[in-house]
Image (spheres, rainbow, N blue to C red):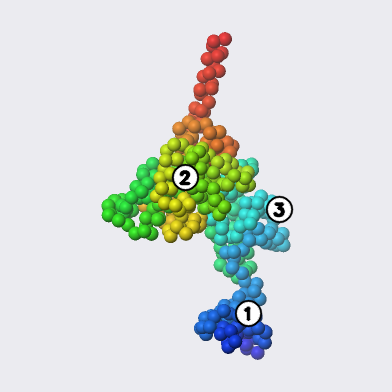
Amino acid sequence: MPSIVDGERLGPKYSARFRSQTGYWALWKGKDRVRSLKTSDREEAQRLVDLAQLQSDAREDDIVDCRRASAEEVIDHRIKAVHRDKVTSAAQIESTLKALRPHVAGKQLRQLDDDWLEETEEAMREEGHSYSYFWNGINFFRTGIRGYCAAKLSPPILPFKMPPRAESRKRVVASEEQVDIERWSGGNDAYDKTTRLWTPRNCISAAEAHRRLIVGRATFLGATFGSRAGIYVGLSYGPRVDGKGYFDLENGVFHRVKPGTKTSSNKRSPKVRMNPEAVEVVDGWRLVDDGCPWVFPAQDRSGPLSQERMRVIYEDAMDELGIEGVFMHVWRHTMITRMIEKGVSAPAIAAVAGVSVRMINEVYDHHDMGEVQMLAHEAMAGMTRRSRAA
């Protein structure tokens, strides 16, 4: 039978029937009524029938939307595969992926972006793993994603970039780049990245003004506090039931998360004291927002922006300015690096940025160790003065 050879299904098909009693079309599968389609439009009813049939066929063929696949399921699939195929390094792959597994808990593949990659590197380093171990884990994971997607007849879903093989110098925003970002986000000027020329404009659209507002605020908070970009979602000007972190401007405290919120061990310092300039700047934002509680609001002020939308806005802005390799998380490393260069003590940096002293020493400090040693000179001098006096 050619139809069977060509893959035609022999089971009951979906169809639509109009019910005059309700005025709606209903979905049927063979002789069984499934549900009301809640529409009186024939074309819309047919579209829903076609969609139901496609979904049914996909389930029968075990086809899934891999973007929404559980990252933990992908890791488990890879571990089973290497043991089934008797891969020589199966034990190594399993142990490495199991170390990575806690950092994908509760996440779908579509949620594993470059910010996640940065945070996972930081967390695994604080757990005592080397950069090579982290790199291997990501490499094994990406191979697992490709295998999982192939098994589900889906193109590979790789939402995060592969980190460099060798531990390299992290990106730091240059001073001239910061000047350009602040000029663009705080004004109306247009910038031509080819000629590097600015063109003054009298006004910009509401959408453009909103983009610049988001970029300006993310830049200021990143350069001032070095927080992870994820804390900007739901950030408000005061505690809210439907919010997350917030600013207590009266007492000059930035609560990265609601008091009492449990965070992973690497996300320390849930609150930080604000300097007077930061209090003044954020209070100015609050006045401009005129009653809108969200620090990073949607354009219509109906709610807070999602992290994904903020990421897109920021990356688009950097592309417009011709600045490569800078996204919101880069400001975290930039802020920590600049504080090290100014001779700020590692514990002080850790308290502001919410990172361990060990992480500062092993990962963030890629400059001349002499700069770090300068932090101890005052104490060393004090000891020798006391020795001479004795």
Residue 132 position within the rendered picture, expressed as x and y whole percent measured from the top left:
59, 46
- Write the residue at 54% across / 48% down: 239
Q: Which residue is mark 1?
A: 35
Residue, disc 3: 91
Which of pointers 3 and 2 indicates the residue nearer the eye?
A: 2
Q: Nearer the viewer, residue 4 or 323?
A: 323
Q: Position of residue 171 (x, y in %)?
A: 46, 45
* Residue, far top: 390
- Tell me the residue at 57%/79% (across/down): 38
Looking at the picture, tell me which residue is in the foreground, 88 or 168: 168
Q: Earlier in the sequence, mark 3 or mark 1?
A: 1
Query: Does residue 96 appear to the left or right of 216 in the view shown?
Result: right
As displayed, is residue 174 above or below residue 379? below
Give the image location of residue 103, x and y in percent: 62, 51
Quadrant for the N terminus, please. Answer: bottom right
- Kindly report the distance in space between the C-alpha atoms of the residues bearing marks 3 and 2: 40 Å
Residue 57: x and y, percent? 62, 77
Chain-order first, disc 2 or disc 1: 1
- Badge 1: residue crowd in 10 Å (few <14, some 14–19, many ≥20): few
Answer yes or no: is residue 102 visible: yes
- Left or right of 295 in this view: 359: right
Quarter residue 12 falls in:
bottom right
User: Real-space Cα distance between discs 3 and 1?
Assistant: 49 Å
Instruction: Using the image, tell me which numbered label, if any, was put on residue 229.
Output: none
User: Residue at coordinates 54% horizontally, 11% vertically from top-left?
Assistant: 388
Looking at the rendered structure, the secondary structure element under dot 3 is helix
Residue 222 disc label: 2
Label 1: element kind: strand
